[in-house]
Amino acid sequence: MPKRLWNLFCRSRIGRSIFRVGLPASSLDRMRAAVSSFVLHIHPAKVHARTLKFSTTFGLGLISLYLFIILSVTGALLMFYYVPSTTQAYDRMLDLRGTVAFGIFLRNMHRWAAHAMVAVVFLHMCRVFLTGAYKPPREFNWVIGVFLLLVTFFLSFTGYLLPWDQLAFWAITVGTSIAGYAPVFGKEVKFLLLGDSTVGQEALLRFYVLHVAVLPIVLTMLATIHFWRIRKDGGLARPAEEDAASGDASGAGDVAIVSAPAVVIATSAGAAAAARPLAEKRQYGIQGLVRGQLTKVGSLSDRFRFSWPDLFQAELLVFVITVAGILLVSLFFNAPLEEPVNVMHPPNPAKAPWYFLGLQEMVSYSAFWGGVGIPTIEVLILLLVPYLDRKQVGVGKWFAKERLLPNSLFMTFAVVNVVLMVIGTFFRGANWEFVSPW
Ligand code: HEM
């Protein structure tokens, strides 16, 4: 019944002005729905079967996106209550906890989704590296990804100050003092961030504006280019053999409908085509739209699936699991809120947010190298990776044998950073002395 009502609505004058296709009943309709809808047309009409396999990506890029959406929605709701003032911010946190309906739940969701996003974006970067998916033609998308990672860190960091409790104040004091170790411009950068020489009202206002407006806009713009590039680079990276098996030399999987009713062409996915060794060209004819036997190049099997329903269902499932996970964690664990800020009583040790504790640990050995030198070199190497390692081997395969050296180097980088973070979090006590967590 709802299906019939929906179809009736879609066929009405108003319905047709909004949705060009009703609930699709055929492959042609499904394809047309995918390319004519604002949200769905970000996807190709067909994707390679490998894209749909969970182990290809573990859904990590999508989960990052969904966490950002959860953060935007809960963040907008929190903005109705929050005031970026040193005299009011903490009280507003107490209000959220005590008097605002579902206030604490909203804050929990925002806080846990923010932590999760930092971790998931990092894991997504690891998956892209370990499957060699940064190689041509995807070098630039990797570079955009590195900026996305940095913006994610900075978004989380600027949000940390807003509750204006002891944890927030001292974490940001430590974090921004790390920026101050930079040579030449260190002091200026710190002043630019804080609007003052210490963390106070100016810093709170600056962090607030960065957190609710500037950085989300930057992240949205970068993410939009990131998704557009995924399509233009020929969908997700996959081994060359897969294309040979499917008869798709361009690696595109990027099928576009050229105006209704029914002519379909394969786009050549520009750079992707240039970068891959060409085998036979995949071709789509009008027959590609009707159910049943397709015209195939030779006797090769067609490994492409319609995005509707296969890809959309998978994306919906990942969305539901992500939202459910955050809801569940928020139900059982409250976001921390410590005492109100007391500038005379720093906790000992005063720790930066967990994802900067690796830096803080390195700073304890050398302020300049730990806080600025090594992180800058790490970011530069990450940005250059796809331009240094260009050989088309092991692309789209986890831990490919041919990529033993780059994968080992990357794993060392990732593990060292995680170990330093763990040491900073659990093994450092008063005066940054080594302590046992047990
Ligand atoms: C806010 C952060 C990010 C979001 C929302 C995001 C989202 C996505 C999505 C949805 C995909 C396709 C599906 C998937 O791989 O799971 C993807 C692919 C990709 N991402 Fe990201 N990403 C982010 C950060 C990064 C970072 C930090 C890097 C690397 C430094 C990166 C590099 C790439 C590359 C190269 C691809 C194409 C992979 C392939 O062809 O297999 N992304 N991203």
Image (tube, rainbow, N blue to C red):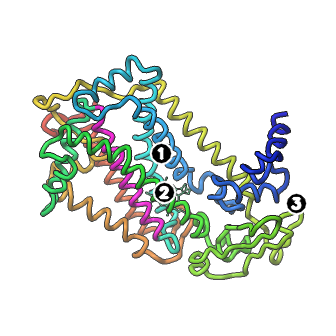
* In the image, residue 214 lies in the stretch drawn in magenta: no
In the image as oriented, which residue stretches furthest toward the top?
A: 99
State the quadrant of the N terminus. Answer: top right
Q: Residues within 10 Å of mark 1 (few under 14, many from 20)?
A: many
Which residue does the image show at 74% across and 55% down from the upper left? 33
Q: Which residue is mark 1?
A: 68
Identified at 89% across, 61% down, the residue is 292
Pinpoint residue 204: horizontal percent, then vertical percent. Answer: 25, 39
* Label 3: which secondary element: loop
Helix, strand or loop at label 2? It is: helix
Task: Tell me how far mark 3 sits from mark 1, CA to CA.
Answer: 38 Å
What is the three-letter code of the residue carrying label 1? Phe
Magenta-drawn segment: 140-163
Instruction: Give the percent coordinates (x, y) of residue 392.
Output: 53, 76
Look at 38% across and 43% down and name the residue there. 212
**Residue under circle 3?**
291
Whether residue 167 sits left or right of residue 225 in the image: it is: left
Q: Is residue 366 visible?
A: no
| Residue type for callout 3 | Arg
Image marks 3 and 1: residues in contact by CB distance under 8 Å: no
Ligand 1 has an atom within 8 Å of the beta carbon of the residue at disc 1:
yes
Q: Is residue 97 left or right of residue 283?
A: left
- Mark identifier at residue 223: 2
Label whose residue precedes the other's in the sequence (2 or 1): 1
Amino acid type at circle 2 is: Ala
The response on whether ligand 1 sits within 8 Å of label 2 is: yes
- Marks 2 and 1, Cα distance to the nearest angstrom? 10 Å
Q: Position of residue 367 (x, y in %)?
A: 14, 54
Q: Residues within 10 Å of mark 2 (few under 14, many from 20)?
A: some
**Image quarter in which the C terminus is found:** top left
Q: Is residue 123 above or below residue 399?
A: above
